[in-house]
Amino acid sequence: MADDNSHLTALTTTYSNQQSTLQTLISARQKLESQFSENEAVRREFDILDKENEGGERGIYKMVGPVLVKQDKTEAVEAVRGRLGWIGGEMKRVEREIADKEAESEKMKMEIYQLQSRLQQQQGPQAQVQES
Amino acid sequence: MAANLPKGQAQPQTIDLGSLPLQQLNQVKNQLTQELQHLTTSFQQLKTAQAKFRDCITSVRDGLSRGEEWTRGQMETLTLGPPIGTPILVPLTPSLYVPGQLASTETVLVDIGTGFYGEKTPPAAQDFYRRKVEELTKNLGDLEKIVQGKQQNLGVVEDVLRRKVMEENSRAGASDGGGG
């Protein structure tokens, strides 16, 4: 029984560790999502800019530190597309990791639960004896 | 020992609230309150952002309009903007200004996100900001619905909690005339 007890403590520690990694993963996903939508908005803006800019003399600038640097349009569009691709891949990766971790911790939860009820059953009769 | 207390978000399915013990109900309530708080802050932030975009529209409209460009929509009432060379005060910090001269009202630079700036004519810039405001209006609407739903949930949980506490009290009172 002491063995079960120490086993339970070990399990719960790993479980709560897992929960916190899960939490970090979830916030990572959230961050990626917002980055994705921001880049997506920029991409849309580039398209609109293209439509407005048939004369071709209106530029795109990029903020580098405190200065604005004129950018080649195709380069800028390419950069944003690259970012979108990267973020998309990263999102998929994090998504998969989250699913894995969730399944794992679900399994662990069951294990803990079983162990706990077993311990309770073992302790149950003893407790009654002590009470009377 | 308290290991199998749920994280809350893992079980949004239908659970009979009445079957939960007080402790867990309290937890659910706290979780909901927290979420609600977070959502309300986001709501507030979106509102602020929207107000800023609106300010941008006003700035572009009132500060830079050149008469001949105003052919669209409700802006037709505006006829003439400041001519080039108009003396202006350029803010360096919110409380420090230096005098300058308007060099051009042809185009403005618009922050389109992730460090990129696009050159746009004032009407196009206004279109941009109006689009942003619209987007935010939509988001705010969605968020409001979510907030309302959460509020409802919270109300239900609080209700059940109150009933449970009362039940518990009356049971304790009936059994031995005052428990703890």
Image: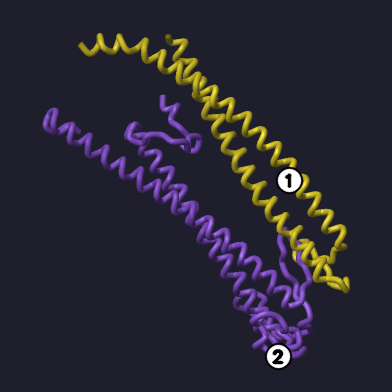
User: Does the image show residue A69?
Assistant: yes
Amino acid type of the residue that numbered disc 1 sits on in the rendered structure: Ile
Q: Nearer the viewer, residue B25 or A9?
A: B25
For residue B89, above or below residue B143: below
For residue A103, above or below residue A56: above
Judged left or right of residue B125, residue A107 is: left
The chain displayed yellow equals A
Residue contact at pointers 2 and 1, CB within 8 angstroms? no
Residue at mark 2 shares a chain with residue at mark 1: no
Q: In which quarter of the image is residue B51?
A: bottom right
For residue B39, above or below residue A116: below
Q: Nearer the viewer, residue B143 or A62?
A: B143
**Marking on residue B80:** 2
The residue wearing badge 1 is A87
Residue at horizontal 40%, vertical 39%?
B28
C-alpha separation, residue under disc 2 versus residue under disc 1: 46 Å
Amino acid type of the residue that numbered disc 2 sits on in the rendered structure: Leu
